[in-house]
Amino acid sequence: MTAEMPDWEKRFRAPRVSLPEWAEDAPDRSLFVSNATGTFELYAWDRATGEQRQVTDRPNGTMDGTLSPDGAWIWWFNDKDGDEFGVWMRQPFEGGADEIAVPGLDPSYPAGLAIGRAAGPVVVGRSTDDEGSTVHVVRGGTAPAEIYRHRESAGVGDLSHDGSLIALEHTEHGDAMHSALRVVTLDGTTVAELDDTKGGTKELGLDVLGFAPVDGDTRLLVAHQRRGRWEPMVWDVATGTETELSLDLPGDVSAEWYPDGSGLLIGHGFEARGDLWRYDFASGELVRVETPVGSVSGATARPDGTVEYLWSSAAHPPQVRSTAGGTVLDPPGMKAPDSVPVEDAWVEGPGGRIHALVQKPAGDGPFPCVFEIHGGPTWHDSDSFASGPAAWVDHGYAVVRVNYRGSTGYGREWTDALKHRVGLIELEDVAAVREWAIASGLADPAKLVLAGGSWGGYLTLLGLGTQPDAWALGLAAVPVADYVTAYHDEMEALKAMDRTLLGGTPEEVPERFAASSPLTYVDQVKAPVYISAGVNDPRCPIRQVENYVDRLAGRGAVHEVYRYDAGHGSLVVEERIKQVKLEIDFAQRYLAAVE
């Protein structure tokens, strides 16, 4: 049976695991995510005994979970069929019945969680359409106490090691792309504030990376953008001292503490690749942590000083590795076949050099070509393993992934460039790479496919309407299709992001929403359109997709729609394979008629 299965399908079915999280005060107790049963669920792993057990078992899967510092409890977020609206549950590490973790809190969208040591506090961030953002503290089994509330988006960053201080990220200034920081006591009293957006002109963001892992240590590791990229600094919230680190690395830099507080594990991303370094506080030295060429999508420093990391490349499937040598967690069963390596393309565009990643099948071009547009928009494609693009290559297509303006990893100006002309700016970059792909002989100009999910699905529909002669067909998964209706139906945090991107609400800046909405251009669409959508999606809600589909149907445009019972994508392997099959079948049917 396995021998007859095509390689592209094996890549989806092969069991895979996430980077294991470990309990800070019980490092032998770990939690990871795996699709071993065919659905992504949480698993507990006792490293001392080697025992692994499945923690959650839900029809549409579970990804969001964490361990209490003492390793006694596994917390997981319980939503309904992927709608992202629910409550935190918990289960003993050894197994047992699930229970509501914080009685007295109504369902909400999650906005951060911090669990204290032993009998320490629990801090829960929440978001709802009616209340905005709230933060609640639970101490000693008492009822949750609200310590923060604001209409704009905010969330819990971290809890200090001794459980006395809470770091919050907030956007009270109204810019959802750039957070400010506030440190408060357990009753909500402000201890310190850090705001790089003051005056509304700097547009610089801050992120909480974590308190120092030592009792009484008031240092908070923070990510900042003061030099045009993300990089770490140490902020002592008691004294106000800010220590920016001199890290001679290009690209974006993140960090986490080594468990003894002596140094930082540096995660470095540059031009779609990632690597690791150690920064030592005593010497100020930066030493490389050896990893293969590709992408490191997660890493953690263990108490013994070793580093575990999740690595992959476009050609090689993910592996959880250790600097101690070998694979840390290797799921049994079928292994995912390799794919082809990625090649870099740099194309001059209207806003500067554009980085694109190219994978192509054997033989000489030009090839039918899929432009697979990433979501986000604040995200980027990388030299990492992706089963979707690999499936297209197996079917004879070249795949081009464009890190358009708005993508992360190329500096703050590149990421922030799409404001107010949302969608249109990204598509200018896609168009420049499309022209390069044709001129270079890579792509058959008559067989160009525009595809993507989430923000990539949005850009697909917008591109089909604004560049109707450029594309042979479009494949849009969980897209924004009608921007005004999407705004009114989506979760509150995304409303705040849209207000930032477009400069207001649909009522305040109707012309910008109209210019950026695929629905505005639906009557110009010429290419066949395939759309898939989750009926419980809170990010790209189904009603606005139906509005777009009704317009296509009303003028007899060629289109197909697949609706599935989940949220913003599916965690069920069979469902994901079904969707890929439908997309490939749609492309092959309609491109077969193209001369």
Image (cartoon, rainbow, N blue to C red):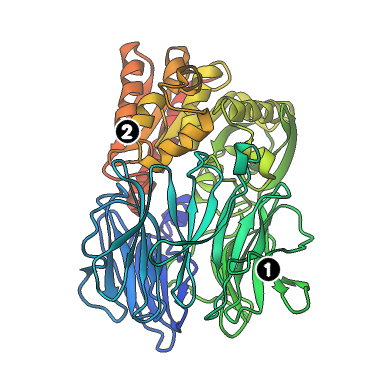
Position of the N terminus, as image quadrant, is bottom left
Assess disc 2: are there few (<14), some (14-19) or many (≥20) residues with their C-alpha within 10 Å of its C-alpha: some
Which label belongs to residue 291?
1
Assess disc 1: are there few (<14), some (14-19) or many (≥20) residues with their C-alpha within 10 Å of its C-alpha: some
Quarter assignment of residue 43:
bottom left
Amino acid under disc 2: Asp
Left or right of 325 on screen, residue 335: left
Quarter assignment of residue 287:
bottom right
Which label belongs to residue 102?
none
Amino acid under disc 1: Thr
Q: Are marks 2 and 1 in contact (CB under 8 Å)?
A: no
Residue 307 image offset from top left, x and y in percent: 61, 76
Residue 452 image offset from top left, x and y in percent: 49, 36
Left or right of 576 on screen, residue 192: right
Position of the C terminus, as image quadrant, is top right
Q: Nearer the viewer, mark 2 or mark 1?
A: 2
| Marks 2 and 1, how far apart at CA | 44 Å
Disc 2: which residue: 489
Tell me if residue 155 comes above or below residue 477 in the rendering: below
Residue 186 image offset from top left, x and y in percent: 40, 67
Tell me if residue 496 comes above or below residue 233 in the rendering: above
User: Which numbered disc, 2 or 1, marks the residue that appears first in the sequence?
Assistant: 1
| Residue name at image x 54 percent, y 28 percent | 423
Quick check: can you spot residue 453?
no
Dot 1: element: loop
Between 183 and 226, the one nearer to me in the picture: 183
Q: Residue furthest bottom?
A: 49
| Residue name at image x 47 percent, y 56 percent | 11
Residue 57 image offset from top left, x and y in percent: 26, 64
Between 39 and 86, the one nearer to me in the picture: 86
Quick check: can you spot residue 526?
yes
Quarter assignment of residue 241:
bottom right
